[in-house]
Amino acid sequence: MFEMETHISCLFPEILAIIFSYLDVKDKGRVAQVCAAWRDASYHKSVWRGVEAKLHLRRANPSLFPSLQTRGIKKVQILSLRRSLSYVIQGMPHIESLNLCGCFNLTDNGLGHAFVQDIPSLRVLNLSLCKQITDSSLGRIAQYLKNLEVLELGGCSNITNTGLLLIAWGLHRLKSLNLRSCRHVSDVGIGHLSGMTRSAAEGCLSLEKLTLQDCQKLTDLSLKHVSKGLNKLKVLNLSFCGGISDAGMIHLSHMTHLCSLNLRSCDNISDTGIMHLAMGSLRLSGLDVSFCDKIGDQSLAYIAQGLYQLKSLSLCSCHISDDGINRMVRQMHELKTLNIGQCVRITDKGLELIADHLTQLTGIDLYGCTKITKRGLERITQLPCLKVLNLGLWQMTESERVR
């Protein structure tokens, strides 16, 4: 009886495709060069499902886009743009995601030549740090990208309220919008997005994630607009928005779908603002009030009373002490991540309270907590679920190092 030799070349192309799908992008390309059979198997669309092609567009390459389409690649990141953007759009008519982050030479004129007709397949567009882009480009986007769900405009500092009006007019399916450091955006623009000017624009009422980090012109009126119009919002980033205050928290406190709220470095948020949040109907799973220097121990008491379902809490550099930890820990049974770095009043007593009661913690940040010692750290390291412990500036001698 003869034994047949088994070799990888005997595998069906479908089996090879399954194997190749587990490789990283570079290796997927390499296996295509082994032989004709492997090339054919590696070009199966299942191998490239979800892959984003990263391209330098420097010179004409007639085979580039046909090759991408053969493999079913519909996501593209442009690393450098020395050709017309229309070259990409024409070459990939069914493109789903286009990342132009950091393409500093992209202009309104270049984008205008690319977006000249409806592109119904495009769902994600990233224009972060495309600093020459203005409201004119947003008009094109609103006109031709009606199915867009994610729009990244972080660092596009020439965007104004007029641009937000155009977005509110044309992009009704938008779920995520990033306006980080769009310094000209004010309460009026947020009103447009929230549907407060229905006579001109319906608004982006399907928004689930809104990033307003470092939008310095925003006040509590923006939060009023958001709470009235954006009822589906789940994630709201207001970090470094110095114009919002405790009064604005009253508006946010009844947004029942809100899961994550970032108030990092919002200088006018105090214990009173946390009280408003805790007294509302929020079901937050994540809260960041790091570097809010008016937040103290009383906030921790409010959090324990009304925000006890939190899974992540960041309090870095807040004026909290062991007493505040004591008032909070017994109610926070679901907390998994606690960041208290640079809280210099925390001592071993606070760490012992955390170790005794926050048994579900998987990560804790103690960066710059200069009053803790080996004794407190030994208690923390005994937490059963702990995976991440950040000590940062904390100094231990070689003899005191926790093993």
Image: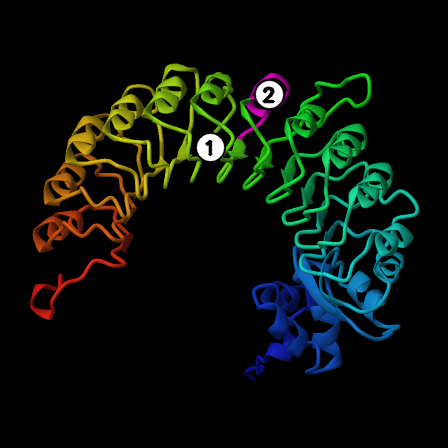
Which residue is at a point 57% across and 83% down the rendered structure image? Answer: 5
Residue matched to label 2: 231
Which mark lies nearer to you, 2 or 1? Answer: 1
Label number found at residue 140? none
Q: Where is residue 327 in the image (x, y as percent from the top left)?
A: 19, 26
Secondary structure under the numbered disc 1 in the rendered image = strand
Which residue is at a point 64% across and 27% down the rendered structure image? Answer: 187
**Horizontal arrangement in the rendering, residue 201 relative to residue 253 (left or right):** right
Q: In which quarter of the image is residue 390?
A: bottom left
Which residue is at a point 47% across and 30% down the rendered structure image? Answer: 259
Residue placed most toward the observer, 303 or 218: 218
Q: Give the range drawn in magenta.
A: 221-234
Which residue is at a point 65% across and 31% down the rendered structure image? Answer: 186
- In the image, residue 399 sits, relative to residue 107, either above or below, namely below
- In the image, residue 230 sits, relative to residue 71, either above or below, namely above
**Horizontal arrangement in the rendering, residue 79 relative to residue 353 (left or right):** right
Q: Position of residue 145 (x, y in %)?
A: 82, 41
Secondary structure under the numbered disc 2 in the rendered image = loop
- In the image, residue 324 sits, relative to residue 81, either above or below, namely above
- Marks 2/1 in contact by CB < 8 Å: the verdict is no
* Amino acid type of the residue tagged 1 in the rendering: Leu
Find out whether residue 228 is within the magenta segment: yes
* Amino acid type of the residue tagged 2 in the rendering: Asn
Q: Quadrant of residue 278?
A: top left
Residue matched to label 1: 261
